[in-house]
Image (spheres, rainbow, N blue to C red):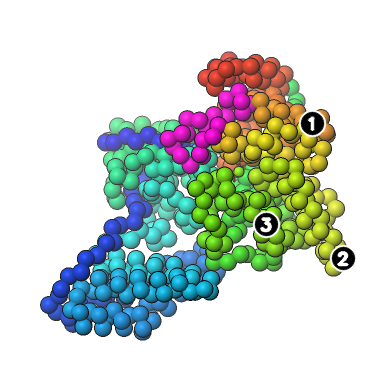
Protein backbone atom coordinates (compact mmCIF):
# COMPACT_ATOMS: atom_id res chain seq x y z
CA UNK A 1 0.00 0.00 0.00
CA UNK A 2 1.28 3.45 -0.94
CA UNK A 3 0.13 6.69 0.68
CA UNK A 4 0.43 9.90 -1.36
CA UNK A 5 -0.07 13.35 0.06
CA UNK A 6 -1.46 16.30 -1.87
CA UNK A 7 -3.70 19.29 -1.38
CA UNK A 8 -7.34 18.64 -0.43
CA UNK A 9 -9.19 20.32 -3.31
CA UNK A 10 -12.74 19.01 -3.13
CA UNK A 11 -14.43 17.32 -0.17
CA UNK A 12 -15.53 13.71 -0.06
CA UNK A 13 -14.06 10.20 -0.11
CA UNK A 14 -14.24 7.79 -3.01
CA UNK A 15 -13.18 4.25 -3.79
CA UNK A 16 -12.50 3.18 -7.40
CA UNK A 17 -9.94 1.97 -9.94
CA UNK A 18 -7.34 4.33 -11.35
CA UNK A 19 -7.72 5.70 -14.86
CA UNK A 20 -4.37 7.21 -15.77
CA UNK A 21 -4.86 10.13 -18.12
CA UNK A 22 -1.38 10.65 -19.58
CA UNK A 23 -0.34 10.95 -23.18
CA UNK A 24 1.57 7.85 -24.28
CA UNK A 25 4.90 8.01 -26.12
CA UNK A 26 4.06 8.18 -29.82
CA UNK A 27 7.53 8.52 -31.31
CA UNK A 28 8.14 6.38 -34.41
CA UNK A 29 11.19 5.09 -36.26
CA UNK A 30 11.59 4.24 -39.92
CA UNK A 31 11.73 0.47 -40.49
CA UNK A 32 12.05 -1.42 -43.80
CA UNK A 33 9.29 -3.99 -44.21
CA UNK A 34 8.89 -7.25 -46.14
CA UNK A 35 5.17 -7.57 -46.77
CA UNK A 36 3.69 -4.38 -48.30
CA UNK A 37 0.15 -5.76 -48.53
CA UNK A 38 0.14 -6.74 -44.83
CA UNK A 39 1.44 -3.28 -43.86
CA UNK A 40 -1.30 -1.54 -45.85
CA UNK A 41 -3.87 -3.79 -44.22
CA UNK A 42 -2.46 -2.83 -40.78
CA UNK A 43 -2.87 0.84 -41.72
CA UNK A 44 -6.46 0.29 -42.91
CA UNK A 45 -7.30 -1.53 -39.68
CA UNK A 46 -5.96 1.42 -37.66
CA UNK A 47 -8.20 3.78 -39.64
CA UNK A 48 -11.24 1.56 -39.04
CA UNK A 49 -10.53 1.28 -35.30
CA UNK A 50 -10.10 5.07 -35.09
CA UNK A 51 -13.41 5.59 -36.89
CA UNK A 52 -15.23 3.34 -34.46
CA UNK A 53 -13.77 5.19 -31.48
CA UNK A 54 -14.51 8.62 -32.90
CA UNK A 55 -18.11 7.65 -33.62
CA UNK A 56 -18.60 6.71 -29.95
CA UNK A 57 -16.87 9.88 -28.75
CA UNK A 58 -19.01 11.96 -31.12
CA UNK A 59 -22.22 10.37 -29.85
CA UNK A 60 -21.19 10.86 -26.22
CA UNK A 61 -20.33 14.50 -26.93
CA UNK A 62 -23.66 15.02 -28.70
CA UNK A 63 -25.58 13.65 -25.72
CA UNK A 64 -23.67 15.42 -22.96
CA UNK A 65 -22.22 18.56 -24.53
CA UNK A 66 -24.42 19.41 -27.51
CA UNK A 67 -24.11 19.57 -31.30
CA UNK A 68 -21.55 22.36 -31.26
CA UNK A 69 -18.91 20.31 -29.41
CA UNK A 70 -19.77 17.12 -31.28
CA UNK A 71 -19.03 18.87 -34.60
CA UNK A 72 -15.29 18.71 -33.83
CA UNK A 73 -15.40 14.91 -33.93
CA UNK A 74 -17.40 14.95 -37.15
CA UNK A 75 -14.53 16.94 -38.67
CA UNK A 76 -12.09 14.31 -37.38
CA UNK A 77 -14.09 11.55 -39.05
CA UNK A 78 -13.97 13.43 -42.36
CA UNK A 79 -10.18 13.58 -42.19
CA UNK A 80 -10.09 9.78 -41.90
CA UNK A 81 -12.04 9.57 -45.17
CA UNK A 82 -9.79 11.99 -47.03
CA UNK A 83 -8.52 10.11 -50.12
CA UNK A 84 -5.55 12.42 -50.72
CA UNK A 85 -4.21 12.12 -47.16
CA UNK A 86 -4.76 8.38 -46.75
CA UNK A 87 -3.77 7.65 -50.37
CA UNK A 88 -0.38 9.38 -49.89
CA UNK A 89 0.38 7.16 -46.90
CA UNK A 90 -0.39 3.97 -48.83
CA UNK A 91 1.69 5.09 -51.82
CA UNK A 92 4.62 5.81 -49.49
CA UNK A 93 4.39 2.40 -47.81
CA UNK A 94 4.43 0.80 -51.26
CA UNK A 95 7.09 2.89 -52.97
CA UNK A 96 9.49 3.28 -50.03
CA UNK A 97 8.78 -0.20 -48.56
CA UNK A 98 8.56 1.29 -45.06
CA UNK A 99 6.45 0.76 -41.95
CA UNK A 100 2.96 2.28 -41.81
CA UNK A 101 3.57 4.43 -38.69
CA UNK A 102 6.57 6.17 -40.24
CA UNK A 103 4.84 6.74 -43.60
CA UNK A 104 1.79 8.03 -41.78
CA UNK A 105 3.72 10.36 -39.46
CA UNK A 106 5.61 11.89 -42.41
CA UNK A 107 2.41 12.53 -44.33
CA UNK A 108 0.47 13.94 -41.40
CA UNK A 109 3.40 16.25 -40.46
CA UNK A 110 3.40 17.51 -44.04
CA UNK A 111 -0.35 18.25 -43.95
CA UNK A 112 -0.08 19.90 -40.52
CA UNK A 113 2.70 22.28 -41.69
CA UNK A 114 0.73 23.03 -44.86
CA UNK A 115 -2.40 24.04 -42.90
CA UNK A 116 -0.43 25.93 -40.27
CA UNK A 117 1.23 28.03 -42.96
CA UNK A 118 -2.09 29.20 -44.37
CA UNK A 119 -3.26 32.76 -43.79
CA UNK A 120 -6.81 31.83 -43.06
CA UNK A 121 -7.63 31.28 -39.33
CA UNK A 122 -10.14 28.56 -40.10
CA UNK A 123 -7.56 26.58 -42.08
CA UNK A 124 -5.00 27.03 -39.30
CA UNK A 125 -7.41 25.43 -36.87
CA UNK A 126 -7.68 22.40 -39.16
CA UNK A 127 -4.01 21.71 -38.36
CA UNK A 128 -5.04 21.06 -34.74
CA UNK A 129 -7.72 18.63 -35.94
CA UNK A 130 -5.21 16.71 -38.06
CA UNK A 131 -2.80 16.57 -35.13
CA UNK A 132 -5.53 15.10 -32.93
CA UNK A 133 -6.62 12.48 -35.47
CA UNK A 134 -3.03 11.56 -36.19
CA UNK A 135 -2.41 10.79 -32.53
CA UNK A 136 -5.35 8.40 -32.58
CA UNK A 137 -4.16 6.51 -35.66
CA UNK A 138 -0.56 6.34 -34.39
CA UNK A 139 -1.76 4.98 -31.05
CA UNK A 140 -3.55 2.17 -32.88
CA UNK A 141 -0.54 1.41 -35.07
CA UNK A 142 1.75 1.36 -32.05
CA UNK A 143 -0.71 -0.65 -29.96
CA UNK A 144 -0.87 1.88 -27.13
CA UNK A 145 -3.96 3.27 -25.40
CA UNK A 146 -4.91 6.88 -25.93
CA UNK A 147 -6.70 8.11 -22.83
CA UNK A 148 -10.07 9.71 -23.40
CA UNK A 149 -12.24 10.62 -20.42
CA UNK A 150 -15.38 10.69 -22.55
CA UNK A 151 -14.94 6.97 -23.34
CA UNK A 152 -14.96 5.97 -19.67
CA UNK A 153 -17.85 3.62 -18.94
CA UNK A 154 -17.03 2.27 -15.47
CA UNK A 155 -16.38 3.88 -12.10
CA UNK A 156 -12.87 5.34 -11.95
CA UNK A 157 -10.67 7.92 -10.28
CA UNK A 158 -8.86 9.96 -12.94
CA UNK A 159 -5.12 10.46 -12.47
CA UNK A 160 -3.41 13.20 -14.48
CA UNK A 161 -0.49 15.60 -14.59
CA UNK A 162 -3.09 18.38 -14.57
CA UNK A 163 -6.60 18.77 -15.94
CA UNK A 164 -7.52 21.84 -17.91
CA UNK A 165 -10.89 23.40 -17.07
CA UNK A 166 -12.30 21.96 -20.32
CA UNK A 167 -10.94 18.45 -19.51
CA UNK A 168 -12.68 18.81 -16.14
CA UNK A 169 -15.93 19.93 -17.77
CA UNK A 170 -15.94 16.75 -19.86
CA UNK A 171 -15.71 14.39 -16.90
CA UNK A 172 -18.87 12.35 -16.60
CA UNK A 173 -19.96 12.41 -12.94
CA UNK A 174 -21.69 9.09 -13.34
CA UNK A 175 -18.37 7.29 -13.77
CA UNK A 176 -15.68 9.69 -12.59
CA UNK A 177 -15.67 9.37 -8.80
CA UNK A 178 -12.80 11.76 -8.24
CA UNK A 179 -9.47 12.94 -9.59
CA UNK A 180 -5.92 13.45 -8.42
CA UNK A 181 -3.23 15.47 -10.18
CA UNK A 182 0.49 16.14 -9.97
CA UNK A 183 0.21 19.91 -10.11
CA UNK A 184 -2.26 22.60 -9.04
CA UNK A 185 -3.38 24.25 -5.83
CA UNK A 186 -6.69 24.71 -4.00
CA UNK A 187 -7.57 27.66 -6.19
CA UNK A 188 -6.54 26.31 -9.60
CA UNK A 189 -9.60 26.16 -11.81
CA UNK A 190 -9.71 22.37 -12.05
CA UNK A 191 -10.01 22.28 -8.23
CA UNK A 192 -12.74 24.91 -8.28
CA UNK A 193 -14.65 22.93 -10.92
CA UNK A 194 -14.32 19.71 -8.95
CA UNK A 195 -16.12 21.42 -6.10
CA UNK A 196 -18.96 22.58 -8.33
CA UNK A 197 -19.23 19.11 -9.88
CA UNK A 198 -19.22 17.75 -6.32
CA UNK A 199 -16.51 15.19 -7.02
CA UNK A 200 -13.70 14.65 -4.49
CA UNK A 201 -10.28 15.82 -5.66
CA UNK A 202 -6.68 15.91 -4.47
CA UNK A 203 -4.24 18.12 -6.40
CA UNK A 204 -0.53 18.89 -6.22
CA UNK A 205 0.69 15.38 -5.35
CA UNK A 206 3.85 15.94 -7.50
CA UNK A 207 4.26 12.36 -8.66
CA UNK A 208 0.94 10.51 -8.77
CA UNK A 209 1.14 9.79 -12.52
CA UNK A 210 4.37 7.88 -11.84
CA UNK A 211 3.20 6.12 -8.68
CA UNK A 212 -0.14 4.85 -9.97
CA UNK A 213 -0.90 2.66 -12.96
CA UNK A 214 -4.15 1.94 -14.77
CA UNK A 215 -6.40 -0.38 -12.78
CA UNK A 216 -4.75 0.17 -9.36
CA UNK A 217 -7.35 0.27 -6.59
CA UNK A 218 -7.48 3.72 -5.00
CA UNK A 219 -8.99 5.51 -2.04
CA UNK A 220 -9.19 9.24 -2.66
CA UNK A 221 -9.61 11.35 0.46
CA UNK A 222 -10.55 14.87 -0.60
CA UNK A 223 -11.04 15.89 3.05
CA UNK A 224 -7.39 15.51 4.03
CA UNK A 225 -5.70 15.48 0.62
CA UNK A 226 -4.55 11.85 0.66
CA UNK A 227 -4.56 9.10 -1.97
CA UNK A 228 -4.07 5.45 -0.93
CA UNK A 229 -2.87 3.07 -3.63
CA UNK A 230 -3.91 -0.60 -3.37
CA UNK A 231 -4.98 -0.24 0.29
CA UNK A 232 -5.13 -3.23 2.65
CA UNK A 233 -8.41 -4.38 4.20
CA UNK A 234 -7.96 -2.59 7.52
CA UNK A 235 -7.30 0.76 5.77
CA UNK A 236 -10.28 0.29 3.49
CA UNK A 237 -12.51 -0.39 6.49
CA UNK A 238 -11.15 2.69 8.26
CA UNK A 239 -11.92 4.88 5.23
CA UNK A 240 -15.38 3.36 4.76
CA UNK A 241 -16.10 4.53 8.29
CA UNK A 242 -14.70 8.00 7.61
CA UNK A 243 -16.85 8.14 4.46
CA UNK A 244 -20.00 7.16 6.40
CA UNK A 245 -19.25 9.81 9.05
CA UNK A 246 -18.88 12.49 6.41
CA UNK A 247 -22.15 11.46 4.76
CA UNK A 248 -23.93 11.62 8.15
CA UNK A 249 -22.45 15.08 8.76
CA UNK A 250 -23.74 16.21 5.34
CA UNK A 251 -27.22 14.93 6.23
CA UNK A 252 -27.15 17.11 9.38
CA UNK A 253 -26.12 20.20 7.40
CA UNK A 254 -28.85 19.50 4.84
CA UNK A 255 -31.48 20.35 7.48
CA UNK A 256 -30.41 24.01 7.18
CA UNK A 257 -31.27 24.31 3.50
CA UNK A 258 -34.16 26.75 3.85
CA UNK A 259 -32.82 28.65 6.87
CA UNK A 260 -31.26 32.09 6.96
CA UNK A 261 -27.58 32.61 7.79
CA UNK A 262 -27.63 34.35 11.17
CA UNK A 263 -25.16 34.47 14.05
CA UNK A 264 -26.15 33.69 17.66
CA UNK A 265 -26.57 37.43 18.31
CA UNK A 266 -28.80 38.00 15.27
CA UNK A 267 -26.36 39.33 12.64
CA UNK A 268 -27.45 38.16 9.20
CA UNK A 269 -25.22 37.60 6.17
CA UNK A 270 -25.84 36.29 2.66
CA UNK A 271 -24.38 32.92 1.69
CA UNK A 272 -24.10 32.87 -2.10
CA UNK A 273 -22.73 30.39 -4.63
CA UNK A 274 -20.08 30.54 -7.32
CA UNK A 275 -21.22 28.99 -10.60
CA UNK A 276 -19.68 28.29 -14.02
CA UNK A 277 -22.74 27.35 -16.08
CA UNK A 278 -26.56 27.55 -15.82
CA UNK A 279 -26.51 23.79 -15.04
CA UNK A 280 -24.84 24.60 -11.69
CA UNK A 281 -28.08 26.24 -10.47
CA UNK A 282 -29.41 22.87 -9.36
CA UNK A 283 -26.56 22.60 -6.85
CA UNK A 284 -27.20 26.18 -5.68
CA UNK A 285 -30.81 25.33 -4.89
CA UNK A 286 -30.05 21.96 -3.29
CA UNK A 287 -27.52 23.64 -1.03
CA UNK A 288 -29.65 26.61 0.02
CA UNK A 289 -27.74 29.35 -1.86
CA UNK A 290 -29.23 32.80 -1.19
CA UNK A 291 -27.71 34.41 -4.30
CA UNK A 292 -25.19 33.79 -7.05
CA UNK A 293 -22.15 35.75 -5.92
CA UNK A 294 -19.98 34.89 -8.92
CA UNK A 295 -21.01 33.58 -12.31
CA UNK A 296 -17.74 32.84 -14.12
CA UNK A 297 -18.91 33.54 -17.68
CA UNK A 298 -15.65 32.44 -19.29
CA UNK A 299 -16.86 28.83 -19.30
CA UNK A 300 -19.38 29.90 -21.97
CA UNK A 301 -16.41 30.79 -24.17
CA UNK A 302 -14.33 27.68 -23.47
CA UNK A 303 -14.27 24.21 -25.04
CA UNK A 304 -15.62 25.45 -28.34
CA UNK A 305 -14.38 26.62 -31.73
CA UNK A 306 -15.52 30.24 -31.85
CA UNK A 307 -16.91 33.03 -29.69
CA UNK A 308 -20.45 32.54 -28.36
CA UNK A 309 -22.97 34.80 -30.13
CA UNK A 310 -24.93 37.53 -28.35
CA UNK A 311 -28.05 35.36 -28.46
CA UNK A 312 -26.29 32.30 -27.04
CA UNK A 313 -25.00 34.42 -24.17
CA UNK A 314 -28.38 36.06 -23.66
CA UNK A 315 -30.00 32.62 -23.25
CA UNK A 316 -27.44 31.54 -20.66
CA UNK A 317 -27.71 34.76 -18.60
CA UNK A 318 -31.50 34.73 -18.82
CA UNK A 319 -31.59 31.10 -17.62
CA UNK A 320 -29.51 31.96 -14.56
CA UNK A 321 -31.45 35.15 -13.72
CA UNK A 322 -34.82 33.45 -14.14
CA UNK A 323 -33.64 30.41 -12.24
CA UNK A 324 -32.70 32.56 -9.23
CA UNK A 325 -36.00 34.48 -9.23
CA UNK A 326 -35.65 37.71 -7.24
CA UNK A 327 -32.35 36.67 -5.66
CA UNK A 328 -29.28 38.64 -6.83
CA UNK A 329 -26.99 37.22 -9.52
CA UNK A 330 -23.50 38.69 -9.80
CA UNK A 331 -22.24 38.06 -13.31
CA UNK A 332 -18.56 38.56 -13.93
CA UNK A 333 -17.61 39.70 -17.43
CA UNK A 334 -15.12 37.61 -19.38
CA UNK A 335 -12.03 36.72 -17.34
CA UNK A 336 -9.91 34.80 -19.81
CA UNK A 337 -6.15 34.35 -19.45
CA UNK A 338 -4.06 32.91 -16.61
CA UNK A 339 -4.93 29.20 -16.54
CA UNK A 340 -8.02 29.72 -18.73
CA UNK A 341 -7.14 29.75 -22.42
CA UNK A 342 -9.21 30.35 -25.54
CA UNK A 343 -7.28 28.72 -28.40
CA UNK A 344 -9.43 30.36 -31.09
CA UNK A 345 -8.59 33.89 -29.89
CA UNK A 346 -4.93 33.42 -30.77
CA UNK A 347 -3.67 35.42 -27.77
CA UNK A 348 0.04 36.15 -27.45
CA UNK A 349 2.08 33.57 -25.50
CA UNK A 350 3.38 35.35 -22.42
CA UNK A 351 6.08 34.64 -19.85
CA UNK A 352 3.69 35.35 -16.96
CA UNK A 353 0.14 34.72 -18.15
CA UNK A 354 -1.33 35.56 -14.72
CA UNK A 355 0.26 39.02 -14.99
CA UNK A 356 -0.47 39.47 -18.64
CA UNK A 357 -3.06 40.41 -21.21
CA UNK A 358 -6.17 38.99 -19.54
CA UNK A 359 -9.65 39.73 -18.23
CA UNK A 360 -10.64 43.43 -18.36
CA UNK A 361 -7.32 44.31 -20.01
CA UNK A 362 -8.27 42.17 -23.00
CA UNK A 363 -11.93 43.28 -22.98
CA UNK A 364 -11.01 46.97 -23.09
CA UNK A 365 -8.90 46.32 -26.17
CA UNK A 366 -11.14 43.78 -27.92
CA UNK A 367 -14.11 46.09 -27.57
CA UNK A 368 -16.44 44.26 -29.96
CA UNK A 369 -16.12 41.08 -27.98
CA UNK A 370 -16.82 43.01 -24.76
CA UNK A 371 -19.74 44.97 -26.20
CA UNK A 372 -21.41 41.72 -27.32
CA UNK A 373 -21.26 40.40 -23.78
CA UNK A 374 -22.54 43.65 -22.28
CA UNK A 375 -25.49 43.71 -24.70
CA UNK A 376 -26.40 40.13 -23.87
CA UNK A 377 -26.28 40.97 -20.17
CA UNK A 378 -28.35 44.13 -20.56
CA UNK A 379 -31.01 42.27 -22.56
CA UNK A 380 -31.16 39.54 -19.90
CA UNK A 381 -31.35 42.08 -17.04
CA UNK A 382 -35.18 42.23 -17.09
CA UNK A 383 -35.39 38.56 -16.06
CA UNK A 384 -34.09 38.95 -12.51
CA UNK A 385 -31.81 40.95 -10.22
CA UNK A 386 -28.58 41.51 -12.15
CA UNK A 387 -25.28 42.77 -10.75
CA UNK A 388 -22.41 43.04 -13.25
CA UNK A 389 -18.80 43.02 -12.15
CA UNK A 390 -15.54 43.57 -13.95
CA UNK A 391 -12.56 41.29 -13.21
CA UNK A 392 -8.93 42.24 -12.59
CA UNK A 393 -9.53 45.96 -12.14
CA UNK A 394 -6.17 47.57 -11.29
CA UNK A 395 -6.97 51.26 -11.83
CA UNK A 396 -9.92 53.60 -11.49
CA UNK A 397 -9.62 54.43 -15.20
CA UNK A 398 -10.21 50.80 -16.13
CA UNK A 399 -13.46 50.78 -14.18
CA UNK A 400 -14.54 54.07 -15.74
CA UNK A 401 -13.77 52.80 -19.25
CA UNK A 402 -15.69 49.57 -18.69
CA UNK A 403 -18.63 51.45 -17.18
CA UNK A 404 -18.68 53.87 -20.13
CA UNK A 405 -18.94 50.97 -22.61
CA UNK A 406 -21.69 49.45 -20.50
CA UNK A 407 -23.67 52.72 -20.49
CA UNK A 408 -23.15 53.20 -24.24
CA UNK A 409 -24.58 49.75 -24.99
CA UNK A 410 -27.45 50.42 -22.60
CA UNK A 411 -28.31 53.66 -24.35
CA UNK A 412 -28.19 51.97 -27.76
CA UNK A 413 -30.53 49.19 -26.63
CA UNK A 414 -32.98 51.66 -25.12
CA UNK A 415 -32.95 53.63 -28.40
CA UNK A 416 -33.68 50.37 -30.24
CA UNK A 417 -36.71 49.89 -27.99
CA UNK A 418 -35.26 46.88 -26.14
CA UNK A 419 -36.34 46.51 -22.50
CA UNK A 420 -33.46 46.94 -20.05
CA UNK A 421 -33.60 46.97 -16.23
CA UNK A 422 -32.86 50.25 -14.45
CA UNK A 423 -31.79 48.41 -11.34
CA UNK A 424 -28.47 46.87 -12.45
CA UNK A 425 -25.62 47.25 -9.97
CA UNK A 426 -22.10 47.73 -11.34
CA UNK A 427 -19.19 46.50 -9.28
CA UNK A 428 -15.62 45.28 -9.46
CA UNK A 429 -13.58 42.34 -8.33
CA UNK A 430 -10.97 43.41 -5.83
CA UNK A 431 -8.17 40.99 -6.64
CA UNK A 432 -5.22 43.26 -7.32
CA UNK A 433 -3.49 44.89 -4.34
CA UNK A 434 -3.48 48.36 -5.96
CA UNK A 435 -7.27 48.31 -5.91
CA UNK A 436 -7.54 47.00 -2.35
CA UNK A 437 -5.26 49.77 -1.13
CA UNK A 438 -7.35 52.61 -2.61
CA UNK A 439 -10.71 50.94 -1.98
CA UNK A 440 -11.91 54.20 -0.38
CA UNK A 441 -11.53 55.97 -3.74
CA UNK A 442 -13.16 53.15 -5.73
CA UNK A 443 -16.02 52.99 -3.21
CA UNK A 444 -17.23 56.41 -4.36
CA UNK A 445 -17.73 55.11 -7.93
CA UNK A 446 -18.79 51.45 -7.75
CA UNK A 447 -22.01 49.95 -6.40
CA UNK A 448 -20.26 47.01 -4.75
CA UNK A 449 -17.02 45.11 -4.32
CA UNK A 450 -16.39 41.40 -4.53
CA UNK A 451 -13.04 40.35 -3.16
CA UNK A 452 -11.32 37.72 -5.29
CA UNK A 453 -8.90 36.28 -2.79
CA UNK A 454 -7.60 33.56 -5.11
CA UNK A 455 -5.85 36.23 -7.12
CA UNK A 456 -5.54 38.83 -4.36
CA UNK A 457 -3.46 36.37 -2.32
CA UNK A 458 -1.37 35.27 -5.31
CA UNK A 459 -0.56 38.88 -6.22
CA UNK A 460 0.00 40.10 -2.65
CA UNK A 461 2.26 37.18 -1.74
CA UNK A 462 3.78 36.97 -5.28
CA UNK A 463 3.00 33.23 -5.36
CA UNK A 464 1.64 31.58 -8.51
CA UNK A 465 -1.64 29.88 -7.60
CA UNK A 466 -0.86 26.99 -9.97
CA UNK A 467 2.40 26.07 -8.31
CA UNK A 468 2.37 23.45 -5.57
CA UNK A 469 5.97 24.43 -4.71
CA UNK A 470 4.88 27.83 -3.46
CA UNK A 471 1.44 26.81 -2.26
CA UNK A 472 2.60 27.40 1.33
CA UNK A 473 2.35 31.10 0.47
CA UNK A 474 -1.37 30.80 -0.19
CA UNK A 475 -2.01 32.28 3.27
CA UNK A 476 -5.53 33.62 3.65
CA UNK A 477 -4.96 34.27 7.37
CA UNK A 478 -1.74 36.19 6.89
CA UNK A 479 -2.13 39.59 8.61
CA UNK A 480 -1.22 41.32 5.32
CA UNK A 481 -4.21 39.74 3.59
CA UNK A 482 -6.48 40.36 6.59
CA UNK A 483 -5.60 44.05 6.62
CA UNK A 484 -6.32 44.41 2.90
CA UNK A 485 -9.67 42.63 3.19
CA UNK A 486 -10.68 44.66 6.23
CA UNK A 487 -9.72 47.88 4.45
CA UNK A 488 -11.95 47.03 1.48
CA UNK A 489 -14.99 46.15 3.62
CA UNK A 490 -14.68 49.27 5.76
CA UNK A 491 -14.20 51.51 2.73
CA UNK A 492 -17.38 50.18 1.11
CA UNK A 493 -19.44 50.61 4.27
CA UNK A 494 -18.30 54.23 4.67
CA UNK A 495 -19.89 54.95 1.28
CA UNK A 496 -23.00 52.90 2.00
CA UNK A 497 -21.94 50.14 -0.42
CA UNK A 498 -21.66 46.40 0.17
CA UNK A 499 -18.78 43.95 -0.09
CA UNK A 500 -18.88 40.31 -1.01
CA UNK A 501 -16.08 37.80 -1.32
CA UNK A 502 -16.03 35.22 -4.11
CA UNK A 503 -12.52 33.80 -3.69
CA UNK A 504 -12.16 30.40 -2.05
CA UNK A 505 -11.39 32.09 1.29
CA UNK A 506 -15.10 32.95 1.65
CA UNK A 507 -16.01 29.28 2.17
CA UNK A 508 -13.02 28.42 4.35
CA UNK A 509 -14.20 27.48 7.84
CA UNK A 510 -11.08 28.99 9.44
CA UNK A 511 -11.54 32.32 7.63
CA UNK A 512 -15.30 32.66 8.17
CA UNK A 513 -15.01 33.84 11.82
CA UNK A 514 -12.60 36.60 10.73
CA UNK A 515 -14.71 37.67 7.74
CA UNK A 516 -17.82 37.83 9.90
CA UNK A 517 -15.98 40.01 12.41
CA UNK A 518 -14.87 42.36 9.60
CA UNK A 519 -18.49 42.81 8.53
CA UNK A 520 -18.37 41.02 5.17
CA UNK A 521 -21.90 41.22 3.71
CA UNK A 522 -21.92 38.37 1.22
CA UNK A 523 -19.90 35.14 1.26
CA UNK A 524 -19.81 33.44 -2.13
CA UNK A 525 -18.43 29.91 -2.32
CA UNK A 526 -18.72 26.53 -3.98
CA UNK A 527 -22.37 25.54 -3.49
CA UNK A 528 -21.29 22.43 -1.61
CA UNK A 529 -19.70 24.54 1.16
CA UNK A 530 -22.80 26.66 1.89
CA UNK A 531 -24.61 24.43 4.39
CA UNK A 532 -21.46 23.74 6.38
CA UNK A 533 -20.80 27.50 6.54
CA UNK A 534 -24.37 28.20 7.64
CA UNK A 535 -24.09 25.67 10.42
CA UNK A 536 -20.82 27.27 11.56
CA UNK A 537 -22.18 30.85 11.48
CA UNK A 538 -25.16 29.86 13.64
CA UNK A 539 -22.71 29.02 16.42
CA UNK A 540 -20.69 32.25 16.28
CA UNK A 541 -21.26 35.67 17.93
CA UNK A 542 -20.56 38.85 15.96
CA UNK A 543 -19.16 40.81 18.91
CA UNK A 544 -16.64 38.10 19.73
CA UNK A 545 -15.57 37.86 16.09
CA UNK A 546 -14.98 41.63 15.99
CA UNK A 547 -12.66 41.27 18.94
CA UNK A 548 -10.90 38.39 17.19
CA UNK A 549 -10.29 40.57 14.12
CA UNK A 550 -8.81 43.44 16.13
CA UNK A 551 -6.26 41.05 17.60
CA UNK A 552 -5.64 39.11 14.36
CA UNK A 553 -4.60 42.13 12.29
CA UNK A 554 -1.93 42.90 14.88
CA UNK A 555 -0.37 39.42 14.70
CA UNK A 556 2.98 38.83 13.03
CA UNK A 557 2.31 35.48 11.39
CA UNK A 558 -0.35 33.18 10.00
CA UNK A 559 0.37 30.74 12.82
CA UNK A 560 -0.42 33.35 15.45
CA UNK A 561 -3.69 34.16 13.69
CA UNK A 562 -4.61 30.48 13.54
CA UNK A 563 -4.01 30.13 17.27
CA UNK A 564 -6.31 33.10 17.91
CA UNK A 565 -9.04 31.64 15.68
CA UNK A 566 -8.83 28.42 17.63
CA UNK A 567 -9.11 30.30 20.92
CA UNK A 568 -12.17 32.27 19.77
CA UNK A 569 -14.08 29.45 18.16
CA UNK A 570 -13.62 26.46 20.41
C1 LIG B 1 -10.49 35.12 -7.45
O1 LIG B 1 -9.48 35.48 -8.05
O2 LIG B 1 -10.57 35.03 -6.23
C2 LIG B 1 -11.70 34.73 -8.21
C3 LIG B 1 -12.82 34.46 -7.58
O3 LIG B 1 -11.60 34.63 -9.55
P1 LIG B 1 -10.93 33.39 -10.31
O4 LIG B 1 -10.72 32.30 -9.29
O5 LIG B 1 -11.88 32.97 -11.38
O6 LIG B 1 -9.68 33.98 -10.82
MG1 LIG C 1 -9.52 36.00 -10.15
Ligand 1 closer than 8 Å to label 2 CB:
no
Q: Is residue 441 covered in magenta?
A: no
**Residue 156 pos. (x, y %):** 37, 50
Which residue in the protein does label 1 denote? Answer: 493
Give the residue drawn at x 47%, y 30%: 472
Q: Which residues are magenta?
A: 461-482
Image marks 3 and 1: residues in contact by CB distance under 8 Å: no
Instruction: Based on the picture, tell me whether residue 475 belongs to the magenta stretch.
Output: yes
* Left or right: residue 494 compared with residue 358: right
Residue 415 disc label: 2
In the picture, which quadrant includes the C terminus?
A: top right
Front residue (pair 282, 188): 188
Identify the secondary structure beneath mark 3. helix
Residue plotted at (40% across, 33% down): 241
Q: Nearer the viewer, residue 468 or 520?
A: 468
Residue that label 3 marks? 365
Please indicate whether residue 445 sits to the left or right of residue 305 in the image: right
Residue 77 % position (x, y): 41, 75
Amino acid sequence: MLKLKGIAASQGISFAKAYVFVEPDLTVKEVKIEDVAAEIKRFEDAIEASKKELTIIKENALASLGADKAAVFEAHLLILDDPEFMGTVKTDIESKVINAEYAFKETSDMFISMFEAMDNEYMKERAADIRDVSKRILAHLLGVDLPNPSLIDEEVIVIAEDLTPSDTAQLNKKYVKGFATNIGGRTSHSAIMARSLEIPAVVGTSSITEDVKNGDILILDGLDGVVLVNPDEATTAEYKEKHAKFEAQKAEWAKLVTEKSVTKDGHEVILAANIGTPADLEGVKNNGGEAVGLYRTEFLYMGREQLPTEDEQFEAYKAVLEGMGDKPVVVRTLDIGGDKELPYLDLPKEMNPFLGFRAIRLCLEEKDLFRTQLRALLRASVYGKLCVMFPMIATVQEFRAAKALFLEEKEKLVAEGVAVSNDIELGIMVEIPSTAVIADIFAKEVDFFSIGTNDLIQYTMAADRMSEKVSYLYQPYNPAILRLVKNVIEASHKEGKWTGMCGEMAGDSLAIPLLLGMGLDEFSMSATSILQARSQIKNLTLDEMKELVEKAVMCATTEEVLALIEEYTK
